[in-house]
Image: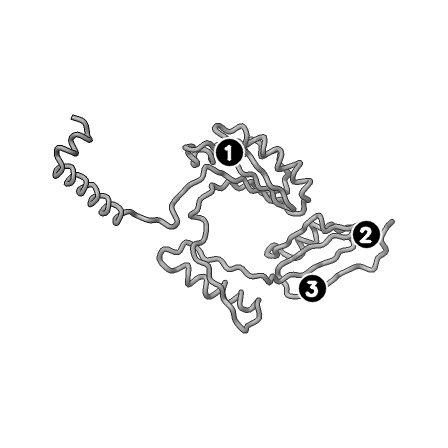
């Protein structure tokens, strides 16, 4: 017996079956779960390498291109993209869907470990990270005050953020501010060479607790600029010794 014929001959039965399906559909729809931020894992692994003091061209030649060739040899790699800037090399490795990222990330670490001896000694060890939505913050707060920006940032970092991190379910709390404390030091390289000093010796003299950014692109002629985010003023320290032509 065909379905149209059954529906015509058994009108009551067909109506009851349709009503049951409608009721079950309404119940299922009302109990359907909704996740605004699902735990979705993209098959992407990032390799981040920092090299303080190196220009983007140097990093492209000594870090990005060699590491691209290394990670391309890993199994099930679909696409490799990279982004190079002053002092930082970021390589994104996209795998085929269904790839176990734990094993894939470990394979990349193993391949980089074999090539690590050929990387510049001044560069930091490559950091291999898996892409996950769980790493993104879910709540943003904006705080305004009549206090000076640096004072407000200190209060948020030392008092507010630690209290938020103690709340159940909070993994971390980060503070971002547009204002950064820094000193701009303008150094005369000729004067350094006359005294037998190097830029690295000056950096060590400022202490290991000093955070120093040394972009090579800020060099002009015989001068080089450092940006140190630990002071609130801008000073210029220039030696009076004559510079060589």
Residue at point 78% right, 60% down? 238
Q: From what the image shows, is residue 26 above or below residue 66?
A: below
Identify the element where label 3 is drawn.
Answer: loop
Residue at point 51% right, 29% down? 74
* Nearer to us in this view, 146 or 223: 146
Among the two numbered marks 2 and 3 on one chain, the one whose residue lies closer to the N terminus: 2
Label 1 and label 2: CA atoms lie apart by 44 Å
Which of the two marks, 2 or 3, is nearer to us in this view? 3
Q: From what the image shows, is residue 163 above or below residue 51?
A: below
Residue 6 horizontal/vertical position (percent) = 15, 31
Question: Which residue is under mark 3?
Answer: 234
Q: Examine the image and state in which quarter residue 99 appears.
A: top left
10 Å neighbourhood of mark 3: few (<14), some, or many (≥20)? few
**Residue 190 - label:** 2
Residue 47 horizontal/vertical position (percent) = 54, 39
Query: Which residue is outermost to the bottom?
Result: 146
Residue at point 65% right, 36% down? 62
Identify the element where label 1 is drawn.
Answer: helix
**Residue 245 - label:** none
* Nearer to us in this view, 134 or 109: 134
Question: Which residue is under mark 1?
Answer: 108
């Amino acid at each position: 017996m065909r379905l149209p014929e059954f529906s015509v001959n058994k009108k009551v039965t067909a109506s009851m079956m349709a009503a049951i399906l409608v009721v079950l559909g309404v119940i299922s729809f009302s109990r359907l779960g909704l996740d605004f931020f699902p735990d979705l894992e993209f098959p992407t692994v990032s390799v981040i390498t920092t090299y303080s003091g190196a220009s983007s061209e140097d990093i492209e030649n000594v870090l990005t291109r060699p590491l691209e060739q290394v990670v391309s040899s890993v199994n099930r790699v679909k696409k490799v993209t990279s982004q190079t800037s002053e002092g930082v090399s970021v390589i994104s490795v996209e795998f085929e869907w269904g790839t176990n990222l734990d094993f894939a990330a470990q394979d990349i670490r193993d391949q980089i470990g074999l090539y690590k001896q050929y990387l510049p000694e001044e560069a930091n060890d490559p950091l291999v990270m898996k892409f996950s939505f769980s790493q993104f913050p879910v709540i943003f707060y904006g705080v305004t005050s009549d206090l000076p920006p640096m004072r407000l940032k200190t209060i948020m970092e030392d008092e507010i953020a630690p209290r938020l991190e103690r709340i159940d379910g909070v993994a971390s709390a980060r503070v971002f501010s547009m204002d950064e404390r820094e000193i701009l030091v303008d150094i005369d390289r000729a004067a350094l060479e006359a005294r037998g000093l190097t830029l690295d010796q000056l950096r060590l003299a400022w202490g290991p607790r000093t955070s120093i950014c040394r972009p090579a692109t800020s060099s002009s002629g015989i001068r080089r600029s450092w940006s140190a985010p630990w002071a609130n003023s801008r000073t210029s320290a220039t030696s009076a010794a004559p510079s060589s032509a």
